[in-house]
Amino acid sequence: MSENTNILVVGIGGQGVMTATEILAEAAIALGHDAKKTEVAGMAQRGGVVSSHLRFGQRVLSPQITPGTADVLLGFESAEAMRWQHMLRPGGITLMNTARLVPPVVELGLFDYPEDPLAEIKKCGNKVVAFDATSIAQGLGDIRLGNTVMLGAIADHLPFGAETLLDCVLKRFQRKGEKLVELNRRAFEAGRAAVGQAEAALA
Amino acid sequence: MAAVMPVPAASRVLMSGNEAVARAVWEAGVKVAAAYPGTPSTEMLEVISTYPDLYAEWSVNEKVSLEVAIGCAYAGSRAFCCMKHVGMNVASDALMTLTLTGVVGGLVIAIADDVGLSSSQNEQDSRYWGRFAHVPVLEPADSQEAYAMTLYGYALSEKLQVPVILRMTTRINHVKSLVTVGERGEHVGAGFTKEPARFVMVPGNAGKRIPLMFAREIKLRELAETSELNFIEDGPDKRVGFIASGPAYMHVKESFPNAPVLKLGFSSPVPFDKCRELAAMVDQVVVVEEVEPLVETELKAQGLKVIGKEILPLQGELSPNVLKPAIARLLGEPMPETTTFAPMQVFPRPPTMCVACPHLGVYYTLSQVRNLNISGDIGCYTLGAGHPWNALDTCVSMGASMGVALGMDKGRGEADKDKRIVAVIGDSTFLHMGMQGLLDMVYNKGNVTVLLLDNRAVGMTGGQNNPGNGYGIHGEEAPRIDFARLVSALGVKDERIHKVNPYELPVLFKTIRDEVKVPDVSVIITDQPCVLVKDYHKLKPFEVMDDKCTGCGNCIDVGCPAIHVTSRGKEVKPSGREVDLAFVRIETSVCTGCGLCVQPCAPKAIVHHMATSPINLVTKGCEA
Ligand code: SF4
Ligand code: SF4
């Protein structure tokens, strides 16, 4: 059943991973797809690993993405993008935020944070595009825009146009005023541009 | 929580299983809905509470919630109750008698099984309650079915006057898929009819109800045989036919699109004839169920040749990548290639307590007091078992910290002769099941120091209200329990009851150290709100002065996630001992200024930012 599209969004509890996946699902539904969304998030996920699965297409059965079949991996954090590489299908792509969020077990010196997650991912032979979504969001004045930056980043890697996704993003902010809508539009476009540039540099 | 957007009838919406059940409960004209929060069931009642025209409550535990629902159903109106799997252990006392009286108004009990243990102390299969109590079990496989089966459940419940179990698992509760919704219907309650022979379950009356229960079971099996919720989907590949229920059905369809499948939606009592019908169509039958071999065992007892847990795991979630290799082995086929390489090794990232969590100070202090055996409980404070505190020695079930502590005290061996026993429990947990244990401890003259961590919320499940915080389910004002007076009423001596601020570490330390020495029951109440609730107020953030920080790392042991190590080093003490150094910074964008980490810092390197230094307001962080 490979006609379904499998998107895996990963990060840390509190980063807005689930919301981002939900917006992606809304976009797929807006275009008439069947869709299922699920996540693996234990203990209510205070600062723990979160992986959110989205599958859409004509008819989706199992909500979970089978390892080795994800088309796109959207990583909100470097080490998390690395942790989930085995989920990608051959030829799949990773879009990752280069931000490093260091957990307490690393602060305590019990484990090491990987020196260079990007290099580790490249070693797997998978295609990967890295960009600093957190700095982009900060540049726009609010760290919370990171979520929208990430959605902009995936916009050109979907089997449908970026416009539908942008519409779904902006719909969420309509009730909160024109200023927020505009900021999110800019965040979305900035994420989209960042990935575009990073890809051009790779080519 | 915010009110749900009104969704007009006939629209197709992306809903989680929990949201779908909530919608159906509302549409079914339910009058009373009750629950105690518990992952993955919580959102059912959270969403129900946002619908108008029905009564919703957070009960203090699952047994009470079921009893409230039973009262409503006896009164002739429709009732709903939901819980996580372990909650049914608590509610089962009421269930086992409810099955004898039956209901008047429809009653659906949704039980959410945490298959895969995302946040539970055990993994149990709630379908057993259906067998145990002889009540029907419906098992949805996605949100649309969860919605439809809830509505069907009310019809079935009223038709046979039987409570109905809607068995869900995490992959139904928390998976979002498309649902076509309907409109709210009116359900007119029949009213309560006095019928002591039915509703007063003294032995004489109860004994007469048991044959009725078994007669009902025969009718239920007939219904299951003909129910549209149990259907066979034929397929051209007859080598293996599958019997599956719940999410397992989806995994079977995904993995073996060409195989015949019997989908069980009305799965208890098992429709044996339907199963035989499938068996006649195929070479072999494989039963795919999460998690126990329940249907499998019943079919084998019927003399049907089926395969199940011989080839499938007895624990955790099933998925295509579990099913495919198992069936390939069964058929003697080469293993299908799924994953191209093994997962990379990355540090673990377990959940942690929040920045400035009032429990941080408690666990930090406990980790500093020697000679303690600490009995813990269910909730956020279970995280105290992890790094850096390692300050929790047991965790069994809700409220068990009290009894376990008394048992550790009374049953202490020679090695623990000088150990002090501490029990840790949260406010909501205490009200749920801890009170009885404390009463027992007082009555039996235990020597235990109880830490009652009142953070004014059911923290772990998202900060739901409870009688400890003075708010009702809709956030409205409600009577607030006074914990000091409550424990006093349970018999704890007033001089042994202390209220302390968990952010004042020296006071906390002294109180704990003093009380553990007293051979009596003491209760230390820490009273500061969870950082996630509206009563919590942020203060000015702190910063670390680089020139003053000696790298001792003391502040890291508090365990606040806002503290980060910037560099490490080593230092040789005059004694020749080598010590590790860790220099730190505080993430000012998330620090709430609680002042906890300031206290163990000897050189006073943690201060409020100075006017001269640039304020670093934006750093890497999380979305609120
Ligand atoms: S003052 Fe210290 S312990 Fe409190 S929130 Fe800030 S960094 Fe965390
Ligand atoms: S406790 Fe004070 S001196 Fe020690 S590492 Fe923390 S900030 Fe530096």
Image: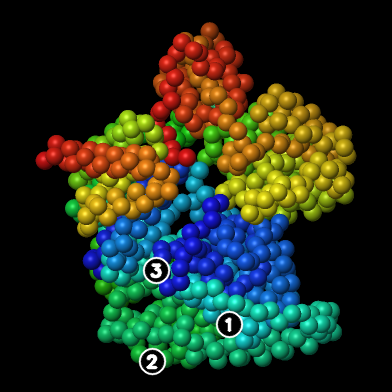
Q: CA distance from mark 3 to mark 1?
A: 23 Å
Residue B528 x/y as whole percent: 67, 36
Q: Residue furthest front?
A: A178
Q: Is residue B37 among what the camera can see?
A: yes
Query: Is residue B447 placed above or below B321 in the rendered structure?
Result: above
The answer to whether residue B170 is above or below residue B529 is below
Would you say B208 lies left or right of B465 here?
A: right
- Chain bearing tag 3 is B
Instruction: Tell me the residue at 62%/66% (across/down).
Output: B53
The earlier-in-sequence mark between 3 and 2 is: 3
Specify the quadrant of the image occupied by residue B13: bottom left
Looking at the picture, do discs 3 and 1 lie on one chain? Answer: yes
- Subunit under mark 1: B
In screen coordinates, is B56 left or right of B499? Answer: left
Instruction: Give the SS element for disc 2.
Output: helix
Q: Position of residue A118 (x, y in %)?
A: 26, 37
Residue topped by disc 2: B280
* Secondary structure of the residue carrying numbered label 1: helix
Q: Are marks 1 and 2 in contact (CB under 8 Å)?
A: no
Query: Can residue A81 be seen at all in this image of the molecule?
Result: no
Dot in front, 1 or 2:
1
In the image, residue B247 lies at what x, y percent? 43, 69
Residue type beneath disc 2: Ala
Task: Note whether ligand 1 is within 8 Å of mark 1.
Answer: no
The correct choice, above or below, for B81 with respect to B305 in the image is above
- Asked whether B242 or B267 is in front, the reply is B267
> What secondary structure is found at the residue carrying circle 3?
strand
Type of residue at label 1?
A: Ala
- Of residue B451 and residue B78, the one placed in the foreground of this image is B78
The residue tagged 3 is B12
Q: Position of residue A99 (x, y in %)?
A: 34, 34
